[in-house]
Image (cartoon, rainbow, N blue to C red):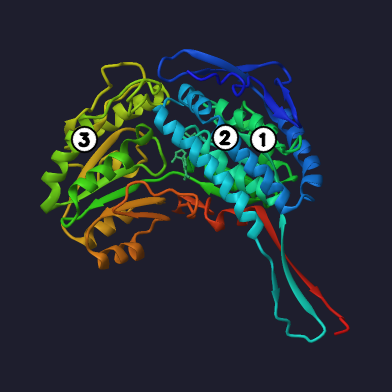
Amino acid sequence: MADYSRFMRQANLIGGEWVSADDGATIAVENPATGEVIGHVPKCGAAETYRAIAAAQRAFESYRETTANERSVMLRHLHDALMDHQQSLAELLTTEQGKPLAEAKGEIAIGAAYVLWYAEEIRRTYGEIVPSPVQDRRLLVTKHPTGVVGAITPWNFPSSMLARKLGPTLAAGCTVVVKPATVTPYSALAWGVLAEDAGFPAGAVNILTGSAREIGGEIMSNPLVKKVTFTGSTEVGKTLIRQSADTVKKISMELGGNAPFIVFDDADVDRAVEGAIASKFRNSGQTCVCTNRFYVQEGIYDAFLAKLKAATEALKVGNGLEDGTQQGPLIDTAAISKMEDLMKDAEAKGGRVVTGGKRHALGGQFYAPTIIAEANDIMQLTREEIFGPIAPIFKFNTEEEVIARANDTEFGLAAYAYTQDLGRAFRLNEKLEYGLIGINEGIITTVEAPFGGLKESGLGKEGGHQGIDDYLDTKYTAIGGLNL
Ligand code: NAP
């Protein structure tokens, strides 16, 4: 085991000081693989958040004056610090979140890649000089840091979801108040240590753990916070959108999904199974882009199902820190109960358990990788985000039918399809109502491309050159009466 003690802070970061909650209250954090308490973090509320926002505003006054190049250098230091400590940060992540160590290392690496991407992007974030309709006037369009950002993040990617927000925030010249998920606070608090090491000024990054309602309430109501970026459930996202109205904040929302995975008769079945395993069982099925519904065309149904069964049964379930583990525990006991409820409903409505379908023999928060065939549209898991290792398999006949069924949801985050037909690939691009589409690929997230959902899956993009737009205000200035 690496030594992650330097990164595992039991305190919050406000204005460059590591502090406790005002009343000393704390929250216990557990390892989901063992149930052991691994530490305690402050239980902060509105008062501490108010001070953190004030500190971020003070830091913003000078940080906004730094040059893009100066910020780029600090971001590159931050990237290097992440990669230098990849192993220990990954072990800390697995200890609090449960995912296999290899996935945790991948998460640290992709987080570092986002930071580097924005270190590069900010030096090429240009304004414009617009042709003027009047001879003695010149029209300038310029970009400026938006101000203090509020960032609220989930537990399923406790490090990289923050990277996607901190990267553009700090690149743009904004400062931030972060509220991570309560069950996985340490990976977020580690960013405070890393930001200090990289040379960011006190107050540029503030991190608070504690009451979601109180911290969130202050972030949403405080007029100094100009932008809020949230990743989490659609339900909480909608609450935040409503709350943002009073002070007209800019918002970006990365919310829930209900991803279809379509296997056409002409698919390369082995490739489809490989993609299916990656897109379904990664992080024990607890990602927003995880497949929720497998639609398999009649002619390939039996072959796909047989191969998917074999691959699913070969997955090694266990403590993420153990060598070779491919699926860790679920995040909490409520998640286990949700899997049990979804399976009970699906079986009662005609589903056939092909493998799994129950808690794993390891007990605790482990659930067996599961396939349920003969899935149908009246099952609860068709409409809801499963967020766990259950793969429901639906049969379909025609392309037209499956596109309609795939789109029949209020969500619009990720969709996958396997086909060898190039024309069909373009039809899917045009007709699937999803922000992210993988054709013959089960994992498509990359820093170079914009990540974000349509419909009730969200607003705005993270990654790509688009990812920095929300952190910058565009100003138009007309300079007239020029002696030209
Ligand atoms: P969640 O329950 O919505 O929580 C997300 C964050 O919001 C946590 O920090 C949570 O704090 C906080 N929160 C809860 N209630 C709040 C309130 N009233 N005001 C302000 N903040 C509040 O979601 P989750 O269970 O952690 O994450 C899973 C969800 O995230 C899934 O729906 C998944 O699809 C979605 N997700 C989406 C993306 C994407 O990019 N689209 C990526 C990853 C995850 P506490 O922890 O203290 O409750």
Q: Inspect the image, locate mark 1, and give the three-letter code of the amino acid beneath it.
A: Ala
Judging depth in this view, the residue of 94 and 385 nearest the camera is: 94
Q: In this view, does 24 lie to the left or right of 275?
A: right
Residue shown at the point (59%, 47%) measured from the top left: 242
Label 3 or label 2, whichever lies nearer to me, is 2
The residue carrying mark 3 is 311
The residue carrying mark 1 is 195
Q: In this view, does 118 lie to the left or right of 93?
A: right
Residue 432: image x %, image y %? 34, 59
Check the image and report above or below for 110 versus 347: below
Residue 163: image x %, image y %? 56, 41
Distance between the alpha carbons at the discs numbered 3 and 2: 33 Å
Distance between the alpha carbons at the discs numbered 3 and 1: 41 Å
The tag earlier along the polypeptide, 3 or 2, is: 2
Q: Residue 82: which numbered mark, if any?
A: 2
The tag earlier along the polypeptide, 3 or 1, is: 1
Check the image and report above or below for 372 versus 146: above
Judging depth in this view, the residue of 70 and 16 nearest the camera is: 70
Distance between the alpha carbons at the discs numbered 2 and 1: 10 Å
Badge 3 density bin: few <14, some 14–19, many ≥20, Cα 10 Å: some
Check the image and report above or below for 306 versus 441: above
Residue 32: image x %, image y %? 43, 20
Q: Inspect the image, locate mark 3, and give the three-letter code of the amino acid beneath it.
A: Ala
SS label for mark 3: helix
Residue shown at the point (73%, 42%) measured from the top left: 222
SS label for mark 2: helix
Q: Is residue 256 left or right of residue 225?
A: left
Q: Is mark 2 within 8 Å of ligand 1?
A: no
SS label for mark 1: helix
Check the image and report above or below for 302 versus 434: above
